[in-house]
Image: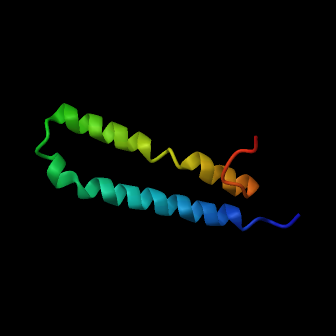
């Protein structure tokens, strides 16, 4: 059985996604510092969950080569 190139490529995409998301969110830290603490906590909670959204299709592609589930 030949190893698939999709798994290493997907792992690199995943690392790139996490890095870009972290840079985007932390670039807002100057603005967020002026917000109330509870609002900041809510913002970081929501943005900490949102980045997970593209993971399911990426992981599916890594396993099957398809971005969408078959019906």
Residue situated in front as seen by the camera: 58 or 26? 58
Q: Residue furthest right?
A: 1
The image quarter in which residue 9 lies: bottom right
Quadrant location of the N terminus in the rendered image: bottom right
Instruction: Name the image colouring.
Output: rainbow
Q: Quadrant of the C terminus?
A: top right
Q: Residue at x 50, y 60 (%)?
A: 15
Q: Disc count in the image?
A: 0
63 versus 9 height, above or below? above
- Residue at image position (56%, 65%) is 12
- Relative to the observer, which residue lies in front, 15 or 31? 31
Q: Single out the residue that lies furthest toward the left.
A: 34
State the image quarter where residue 34 is shown: top left
Which residue occupies the extreme top position in the image? 38
Residue 23 position, x and y percent, is: 33, 60
User: Residue drawn 73% across and 53% down?
Assistant: 63
Q: Residue at x 60, y 46 (%)?
A: 56
- Name the side, left or right, on which 41 lies relative to 17: left
**Quadrant assignment, res 19:** bottom left
* Percent coordinates x, y for residue 28 in the rendering: 23, 54
Residue 14 placement (x, y as % from top left): 54, 58
């Amino acid at each position: 059985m030949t190893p698939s190139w999709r798994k290493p490529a997907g792992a690199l995409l995943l690392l790139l996604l996490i890095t870009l998301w972290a840079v985007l969110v932390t670039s807002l830290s100057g603005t967020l510092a002026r917000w109330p603490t509870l609002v900041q906590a809510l913002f970081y909670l929501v943005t900490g969950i949102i980045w997970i959204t593209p993971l399911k299709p990426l992981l599916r592609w890594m396993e099957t080569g398809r971005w969408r589930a078959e019906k």
